[in-house]
Image: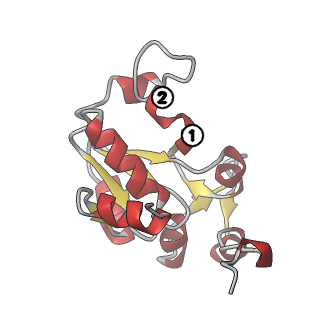
Amino acid sequence: MKRYADLLAEALGRVREIMPWDLRELLRQQPTPLVLDVREPAEFALAHIAGSINVPRGVLEAACDWDYDDTVPMLAGGRDRMIVVVCRSGNRSVLAVDVMQQMGFTHVVSLKTGVRGWNDFEQELVDAGQGRVDTDTAEPLLETRVRPEQMRPR
């Protein structure tokens, strides 16, 4: 039986990752990449990279293809576009990139360290109202929140 860590390790062998400073440079170039945030809508609303779009991981495959309720045309028609996939820490984005590559996306990468790393690099985050989220304010919003009952029994 595979565990989450096993799935991540396997996907990392097939996926290219970039660091926050790499993304900052890409966003300064033309054309800019599409930044795809695969976190849940509530997470995205609290703090996200300005200009990114939100497609939760749970509907990603349908969003990337035509003829579905969840189809996102810029994804379905963007298999050759540069896409940087982000999540909170860089794990969900690795799995998302792995699936997108299987679906024919040719220029898709994962942001290693995710939105947390982007914030640690002191790059701008915005909220749902597009107001700037201060680095210190964002930090607790992006923390891991593993509850005691979620820990492996000893």
Q: Is residue 54 left or right of residue 33?
A: right
Q: Label 2's element?
A: helix
Q: Is residue 28 visible?
A: no
Task: Indicate whether 98 appears above or below 4.
Answer: above
**Residue flagged by tag 1: what amino acid is it?**
Gly
Horizontal and vertical percent for residue 106? 21, 40
Q: In front here: 125 or 5?
A: 5
Residue located farthest toward the bottom when viewing the structure as drawn? 154
Q: Within the image, what quadrant is residue 25 found in?
A: bottom left
The residue identified by callout 1 is: 58
Q: Looking at the image, is mark 1 or mark 2 earlier in the sequence?
A: 1
In percent of width and height, residue 109 lies at 30, 53
**Looking at the image, which residue is at 71% across and 68% down?**
141
Which is nearer the eye, 75 or 68?
A: 68
- The circle on residue 63 is 2
* Three-letter amino acid code at the position of disc 2: Ala
Horizontally, residue 130 falls left or right of residue 5, namely right
SS at badge 1: helix
Graded by Cα atoms within 10 Å as few (under 14), some (14 to 19) or many (20 or more), the crowding at tag 1 reads few
